[in-house]
Image: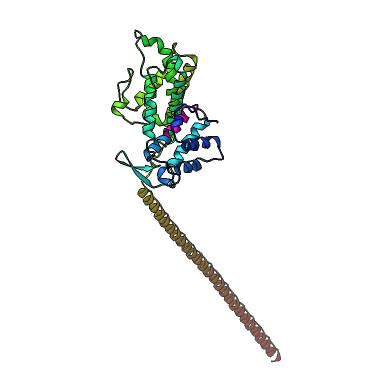
Amino acid sequence: MSVAIVEDEPWEILDEKISQAWIKYLQQMPSHTAIEAAEKLNALVPTNRTEEEEEEDESLEFFLVNVWYVLLEMVRAIPPDHVAQDKLVEMVKALRDLPTNTVVEIWSNETKIWKDLPFLGYVLDEDYNNFDFQTLFFPDEETARREWHNLNAFTARLTVTGVQDNRLYGLWALRRALEDRPDRDDSAHTMQGYILDCYVPVAAEWITLCGSYLYVSDEIYEDLGTGGCFWQGEEGFCLERWQLWKRRFSEISKDEWASEKTQRIAQAAESRMMQIEIEVENMSVDEPEDETETESKTESTAESKTESTAESKAESKAESEAESVDESEDKSEDESEDESEDESEEENKTESDSKTESASEEENETESDLESDSGNELEIKAK
């Protein structure tokens, strides 16, 4: 993307070095990182310059205001869907995250540079107020309408990325587009088509870029968050107001006063809102735990794990011992049975030997008797 410096515009009153810090970052993407660009811009802070570099009669406040004026001047020239918008948000985030500890007093308040992004909110608010909303929708104000749309897209990106909370600007954009409608007897009613074509695309941009964040928001702004003729409820974000906006997008998608392009944009915004509702309902977001609670849970888990391990080991040991005892008993029983069998065999053997001996003795006795009888016979015959 090429960014040119126009000499007859506010660029000429701004510090050339500040302008170049932003411009070179965009022109040299991706070789020139956001952190490198932020560091170069930080080196230009009056308190960080050497004596030779220091500008005469330049205050810190003047420098910081110029930084943001240059940024927003560029933003107004960048379309909502251009990658340069995201790149500039990255650089603002890189500035905010620089490891600097510089604290200065601005308007009687201690402010950290760059962590607090001093004067960005002030310059952003002033830039918004420079737009004339009474004439912004006039046909010949096309350039102003385009710049206002681009500025809102950048502001929504700052919000959804957490760099800076600008939800109030989103609320104003949605209220202006969806909560007001001129009476048919009012002369402004004849401009209704121009009004819708001017404001509805910007409101839809907030839904596209930041809708999920706005849907879950319940921020109340009191007088700053009051509604238009269609809303008399909470002065801020709430689900009822969200439903009103969704219904109004649906109505505008069929409104004869709106152009076909605006009708399509409104229909897409309504669809996106319904999709966001489904996404949030299906999404289970756990609340972040307190650090001490997390540590306590970790310790408790570790203790439980240790106890469980010890119990498991004890049970395993007991089971092992029980198995050993059972095996020992089984072995003893087996040995006892073997011994019994051996004893039985020995007894049987002894009995068998005894019977054998007894039988042998009886046979001897019989033989002896037979011999004796035979002797008697001989003796008788001899007589």
Q: Residue furthest top?
A: 185
Q: Point out residue 64 in the picture as x, y percentages from the top left corner.
A: 40, 38
Is residue 37 visible to the viewer in this orientation of the structure? yes
Q: Point out residue 366 in the picture as x, y percentages from the top left corner.
A: 64, 81
Please report the residue visible at 40 percent of the width from the left and 13 percent of the height from the top: 192
Q: Point out residue 372 in the picture as x, y percentages from the top left corner.
A: 65, 87
Instruction: Say if the magenta span includes residue 74.
Output: yes
Q: Quadrant of residue 371?
A: bottom right
Please report the residue visible at 47 percent of the width from the left and 17 percent of the height from the top: 262
Q: Quadrant of the C terminus?
A: bottom right
Which residue is nearer to you in this view: 195 or 48? 48
In the image, taking residue 17 as reference, residue 124 lies left or right, namely left
Q: Quadrant of the N terminus?
A: top right
Which residue is nearer to you in this view: 344 or 168? 168
In the image, taking residue 44 as reference, residue 110 lies left or right, namely left
Is residue 157 visible to the viewer in this orientation of the structure? no
Instruction: Say if the magenta span includes residue 77.
Output: yes
Q: Quadrant of residue 62?
A: top left
- In this picture the colour scheme is rainbow
Q: Is residue 129 above or below residue 369?
A: above
Which residue is nearer to you in this view: 8 or 372? 8
Q: Is residue 18 above or below residue 336?
A: above
Q: Point out residue 33 in the picture as x, y percentages from the top left corner.
A: 52, 41
Q: Quadrant of residue 253?
A: top left
Which residue is nearer to you in this view: 165 or 363? 165
In the image, taking residue 35 as reference, residue 226 lies left or right, namely left
- For the record, the magenta segment spans 67-81
Magenta: main secondary structure = helix
Please report the residue visible at 39 percent of the width from the left and 17 percent of the height from the top: 135
